[in-house]
Image: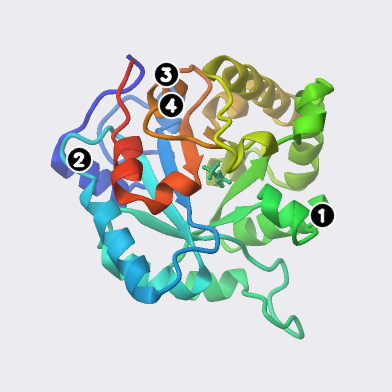
Amino acid sequence: MKFAAYSLVAALVASTTAAFTTTGYFARPSTVLDARRPFISGNWKLNPQTRQEAVDLAKEISDAVTSDTPDADVALFVPYVFLETAMEAVDGKVQIGAEGVCPEMAGAFTGAVSASMLKSVGVSWALAGHSERRVIFGESDEYINGQCLKLIELGMSVMLCIGESELEYNQNLAGAVCAVQLKKGLAGISKDDMSRVVIAYEPVWAIGTGKVATPEIAESVHKKVRDILADIFDQETAEATRILYGGSVTPESVDELMAQPDIDGALVGGASLDAAKFGRIINFESV
Ligand code: 13P
């Protein structure tokens, strides 16, 4: 059993006060595993279609965080226009993050949203490097690195997404692709900054396809990702960094994934739009 349940008060305080910190709020021994508090997150992408639907979904998801919920950080990455209403709807039980950020701070960048804009409305997290941003919107490793650096510079946190395509997977290049994306994405980030970075390994072939990586495949890449982090920083930093799995995570697959030693959480797309499904994922069971 990898994780234990907390009391309701502990879960609520932990998810509001200590969420996204690595120190935690309670008098627990400070160990490497403490730094890797499980992290269940949803990425709403271009959904839902109305403010009211966003409010209802956020409320239903926050209702799924109960006294029996495992000790975990829970977050939703939502479209910019829903950030503030989603924050109100979850009433501190779930963290609300942005799906992206512009590495520039101000100026002639039509349509962009800066890190300081996000910070000013109470957002402290953003995604960077999602494969849909890389492929559809052409975001380069350099641009993604700029996003990471800007968020860290402003005292915010970033979830850096990495992952190989199906062709690359078939060519046995998963580790190599992740190494490039990590090294380029994290350039200029210090060991200390890594306490505000979470990595999401999302094999492109598993995103939205229903083809979830088996726990064994996911674990083997997560282990590689941790080795790459040790190479970039050091073993201690690698052991303290949370690495989440993303790609068709469902209520049926979450428990076994979460049981893997190097899988510290999940970044969930489709199933995070269904409160019952995401609620079950938040309440993953130790196997
Ligand atoms: P799915 O869970 O729909 O496969 O999406 C995963 C994802 O892209 C999360 O960022």
**Label 4 vs 3, first from the N-terminus:** 4
Give the mark nearest the N terminus, 1 or 3.
1
- State the SS at label 3: loop
Q: Earlier in the sequence, mark 4 or mark 2?
A: 2
> To which residue does mark 1 refer?
140
Q: Which residue is mark 2?
A: 10
Q: Residue at x 69, y 29 (%)?
A: 229
Q: Earlier in the sequence, mark 2 or mark 1?
A: 2
Image region (quadrant) for ligand 1? top right
Q: Which residue is mark 3?
A: 259
Percent x, y of residue 186:
73, 44
* Residue, disc 4: 253
- Horizontal and vertical percent position of residue 225: 67, 26
Q: Residue at x 47, y 29 (%)?
A: 264
Determine contact: label 4, label 3, CB under 8 Å. no
Q: What's the residue type where badge 4 is placed? A: Ser
Q: Nearer the viewer, residue 153 or 98?
A: 98
- Residue count near mark 2 (Cα–Cα under 10 Å), binned few <14, some 14–19, many ≥20: some
- The answer to whether mark 3 and mark 2 are in CB contact below 8 A is no
- Mark 4 lies on a secondary structure that is loop
State how far apart marks 3 and 2 are (Cα): 22 Å
Q: Residue furthest front?
A: 210
Q: Is residue 274 left or right of residue 208?
A: left
Helix, strand, or loop for circle 2?
A: helix
